Image (tube, rainbow, N blue to C red):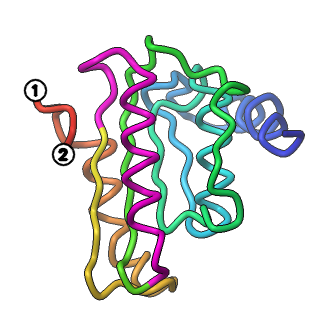
Amino acid sequence: KKYVRFLADTLKPYIDSHYRTKPESEHTGIGGSSLGGLISIYAGLMYPEVYDKFMIFSQSLWVTHHIPWELMDLNDEFTGRVYLYGGEQESATLVDRLKNYRDELLERTKPGNCAVKLEVDPNGQHNEARWGQEFPNAIEWLFFEEPKNDKLV
């Protein structure tokens, strides 16, 4: 909790005050892979007013498969975009947990507000090389593609 508070309340304001950024949430994202994906879920859900884009790769939901939604600040007004990636060769439960996370996220937001894209690689393994290949697709979808009427991709 202290780490994600530091990111949102200290690091991001510092960056915005020292560099030419677009500080609004619609121009701000958070993301990571493995444990970085897990902490990005928590940071994004605790600070939806800061982060409008989540890039979650192979999050370590085997560490904690229960996300404490009741502690989060996410509400039905969230209008962000969430890119989820996982490989079927990572674990027996990863893809199902990605789908559960997607479904829970969409259930807790107003219908049509939150766009979620789930990419599953049947041969994907838990490694940086594969995440590096997926990164350009995620960035393009999160920041550059026009939202479509279909909010669940």
**Mark 1 sits on what residue?**
149
Percent position (x, y) of residue 10? 83, 33
Q: Which mark is residue 112?
A: none
Foreground pick, 32 / 11? 32
User: Residue at point 56% right, 46% down?
Assistant: 30
Percent position (x, y) of residue 135? 38, 66
- Label 2: how many Cα within 10 Å (few below 14, some 14–19, many 20+): few
Image quadrant in which the N terminus is located: top right
Percent position (x, y) of residue 7? 76, 40
- Label 1: how many Cα within 10 Å (few below 14, some 14–19, many 20+): few
Percent position (x, y) of residue 79? 38, 21
Left or right of 120 in this view: 97? right
Span shown in magenta: 90-115
| Amino acid type of the residue tagged 1 in the rendering | Asn
Q: Is residue 139 above or below residue 125?
A: above
Left or right of 25 in this view: 98? left
| Amino acid type of the residue tagged 2 in the rendering | Val
Q: Secondary structure at mark 1?
A: loop
Image quadrant in which the C terminus is located: top left
Real-space CA distance between mark 1 and mark 2, rounded to the nearest whole angstrom = 10 Å
Q: Secondary structure at mark 2?
A: loop
User: Residue at point 49% right, 80% down?
Assistant: 91
User: Residue at point 59% right, 37% down?
Assistant: 44
Q: Is residue 34 above or below residue 127?
A: above
Foreground pick, 96 / 37? 96
Hey, which residue is sitting farthest left in the picture? 149
Foreground pick, 57 / 102? 102
Any magenta on residue 15?
Answer: no
Hey, which residue is sitting farthest right in the picture? 2
**Mark 2 sits on what residue?**
153
User: Residue at point 62% right, 56% down?
Assistant: 65
